[in-house]
Image: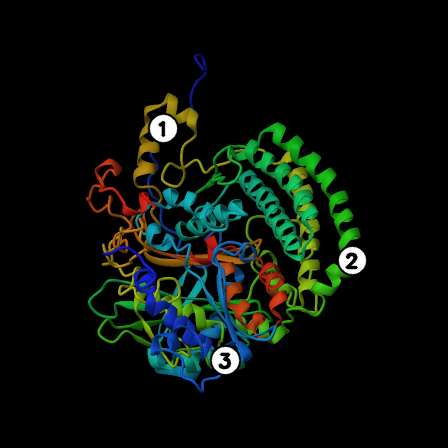
């Protein structure tokens, strides 16, 4: 097609310095940059505020696990962060402080957004439930329990969110295999005389399906 | 296992027994499976049909808009308690994200909110671009914005058609599908696919918008306002539509905030929260539009909010079309570490081919140990992606904040105290998509 045309030629670019400062990220928003709130938290809770991170103009405040409910109540009642946008777990797969839970709070009036994080050890995967402060955390905490096995103390109804109660694993943990555990999730029988389908992904786990002509003739076929 | 007979029927098919037990325990129902398991009814026991009744609606009920299961405890016609069971469409897309490169994962986002896939693509790409600090060319931003607004209209068209069909008016469903078909033709011309568009790329978009698509969009923009006017003439003063909507499913300002609902459900209760204004992304700070808000908080105000949102989207689409005439230039970042090279480069230069391979194999690598969150205003509400990176080409953790999930949480509260006949209206009015809520 383009025989006589000169084609643009590009060298592989060298990685420049990464943008980590606030404001230099092209997608940084004013709403997530909240130094005032961080200062207020540090002034009020002191030692319970463990670390503060800033990336792409987003403040993340690590708080002590036991004081997260108080921090949330303070943010809601005194700094008008009245809306819980998101709550979720993270599996860091480290020896200590394996899990993290993050809270994404929004203030409509101040047009601000802040992220809180707590660290949860593997030996005792329990976090205090913030449902007394933010009722919206109900389903998110259930999801977090379902996916990571982090229990929430004081949650009114800690059932699994997506998986059935009969399921014994927590799928978003790093050690859970991508294809699932064979036999962990029985499905209804696929033929009248068959039992429960114990492995829905049998082929992926290496077992070959029985061809229909090799199967014994069904008694129901005569009826 | 022996053959299924009348005697062993329930034992054989009773898979996931603990799940149903937990659900019924949540309903606090006296007569359900739990009691059935305890043994036959004694003589003096009250007849359950006289006072309360447990009804399972879904997951295959057509009015549940997908695979939503609502177990409700009824007192006469009033819903006393509602337990919503979701997860029937759970595919573990957050787990899949951890095993895909950032670009490979983008088509999976089509399958979340499959009524507005373009908005999901854009949301994911913006989130990755924020984590990696990639700036997108201006023309790509305008095209993304244009297509996101069109996808908002398709989503609201489905909501309207299906919502009215729930209320008994089948003809509106066909009328809205005619315009939805027009929009899908536009998507076909722009993206090469009607539903699973996968058109956005990290660092830009896959291809520039062709001229015939521009003509189609212009024709649609000229045609559609008349259609909305006609529907409003039919519905705004329609006796049946008003009776079924006004005062039904009322949520106050405090309730929607407490329940964490997003999008039109939030704005229908008087809270002017819209991510396009709250934290403007793309070029939303350069276009002129208003955020429709209603104060009543019932189904009718949510209906008005969505109708007006379609008009506002048209306004934005017109401004985007105007801008696209003057804003020319590249549609993807010219940086092989951040975005795919153009096909010309791939086919006619060795460097380009290597870059293409490298981008498919490794792709963009945000810095090690960082995390960021980017939200867009999808048609259903705030769609946010939290990305945590370990410095490789795959997300260490990708968390999806799905608007339908937050909205369905409010459905339980909405249903309790309502009439069973209003159930379909209530599900329709919060406009859930289970592909998104179930992840």
Q: Which residue is mark 2?
A: B238
Q: Is residue A43 above or below residue B380?
A: below
State left or right for residue B85 relative to residue B273.
left
- Residue A116 visible: no
| Image vertical order of residue B337 relative to residue B282, above or below | above
Q: Is residue B217 above or below residue B52?
A: above
Instruction: Name which quarter of the figure residue B418 lies in.
Output: bottom right
The quarter in which the C terminus of chain B is drawn is bottom left
The part of the image, by quadrant, that contains residue A182 is bottom left
SS at mark 1 in the image: helix
Residue drawn at point x = 19 percent, y = 67 percent: A95
Q: Which residue is mark 1?
A: B352
Do marks 2 and 1 share a subunit? yes
x, y (%) of residue B71?
A: 48, 68
The residue carrying mark 3 is B47
Q: Nearer the viewer, mark 2 or mark 1?
A: 2
Same subunit, tags 3 and 1: yes
């Amino acid at each position: 097609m383009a025989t006589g045309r000169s084609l643009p030629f590009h060298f592989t670019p060298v990685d420049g310095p990464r943008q980590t400062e606030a404001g230099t990220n092209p997608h940084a928003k004013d709403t997530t940059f909240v130094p005032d709130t961080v200062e207020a938290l540090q002034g009020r809770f002191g030692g319970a505020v463990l670390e503060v991170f800033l990336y792409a103009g987003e403040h993340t405040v690590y708080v002590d696990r036991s004081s997260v409910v108080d921090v949330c109540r303070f943010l809601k009642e005194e700094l008008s962060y009245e809306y819980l946008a998101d709550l979720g777990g993270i599996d860091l797969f480290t020896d200590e402080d394996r899990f993290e839970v993050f809270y994404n709070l929004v203030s409509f009036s101040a047009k601000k957004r802040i992220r809180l994080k707590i660290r949860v050890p593997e030996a005792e995967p329990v976090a205090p439930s913030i449902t007394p402060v933010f009722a919206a955390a109900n389903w998110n905490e259930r999801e977090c329990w379902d996916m990571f096995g982090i229990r929430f103390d004081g949650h009114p109804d800690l059932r699994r969110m997506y998986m059935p109660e009969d399921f014994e694993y927590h799928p978003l943990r790093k050690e859970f295999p991508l294809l699932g555990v064979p036999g962990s999730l029985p499905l209804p029988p696929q033929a009248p005389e068959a039992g429960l389908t114990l492995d829905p992904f049998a082929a992926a786990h290496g077992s070959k399906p029985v061809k229909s002509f090799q199967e014994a003739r069904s008694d129901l076929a005569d009826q | 296992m022996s053959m299924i007979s009348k005697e062993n029927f329930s034992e054989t098919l009773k898979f996931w027994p603990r799940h149903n037990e937990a659900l019924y325990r949540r309903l606090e129902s006296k007569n359900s499976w739990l009691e059935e398991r305890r043994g036959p009814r004694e003589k003096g026991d009250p007849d359950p049909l006289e006072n309360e009744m447990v009804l399972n609606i879904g997951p295959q009920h057509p009015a549940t808009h997908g695979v939503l299961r609502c177990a409700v405890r009824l007192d006469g016609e009033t819903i006393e308690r509602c337990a919503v069971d979701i997860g029937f469409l759970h595919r573990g897309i957050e787990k899949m994200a951890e095993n895909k490169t950032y670009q490979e994962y983008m088509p999976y986002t089509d399958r979340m909110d499959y009524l507005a896939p373009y908005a999901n693509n854009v949301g994911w790409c913006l989130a990755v671009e924020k984590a990696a600090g990639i700036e997108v060319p201006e023309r790509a931003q305008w095209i993304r914005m244009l297509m996101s607004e069109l996808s908002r209209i398709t989503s609201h068209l489905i909501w309207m058609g299906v919502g009215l069909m729930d209320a008994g008016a089948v003809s509106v469903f066909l009328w809205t599908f005619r315009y939805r078909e027009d929009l899908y033709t536009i998507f076909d011309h722009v993206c090469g696919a009607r539903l699973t568009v996968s058109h956005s790329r990290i660092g830009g978009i896959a291809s520039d918008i062709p001229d015939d698509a521009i003509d189609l969009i212009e024709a649609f923009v000229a045609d559609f306002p008349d259609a909305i006017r006609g529907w409003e003439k039919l519905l705004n003063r329609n006796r049946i539509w008003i009776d079924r909507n006004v005062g039904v499913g009322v949520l106050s300002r405090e309730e929607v905030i407490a329940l964490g609902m997003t999008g039109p459900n939030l704005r229908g209760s008087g809270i002017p929260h819209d991510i396009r204004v709250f934290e403007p992304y793309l070029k939303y700070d350069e276009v002129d539009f208003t955020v429709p808000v209603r104060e009543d908080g019932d189904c009718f105000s949510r209906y008005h909010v969505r109708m007006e949102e379609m008009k506002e989207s048209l306004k934005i689409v017109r401004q985007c079309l105007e801008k696209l005439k003057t804003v020319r230039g590249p549609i993807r970042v010219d940086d092989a570490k951040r975005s795919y090279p153009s096909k010309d480069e791939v086919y006619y230069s060795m460097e380009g081919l290597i870059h293409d391979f490298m981008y498919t194999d490794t792709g963009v690598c945000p810095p090690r140990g960082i995390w960021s969150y980017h939200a867009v205003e999808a048609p259903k509400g705030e769609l946010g992606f939290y990305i945590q990176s370990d410095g490789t080409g795959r997300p260490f953790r990708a968390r999806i904040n799905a608007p339908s999930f937050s909205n369905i949480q409010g459905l339980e509260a909405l249903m309790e105290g309502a009439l069973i006949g209003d159930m379909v209206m209530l599900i329709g009015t919060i406009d859930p998509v289970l592909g998104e809520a179930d992840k």
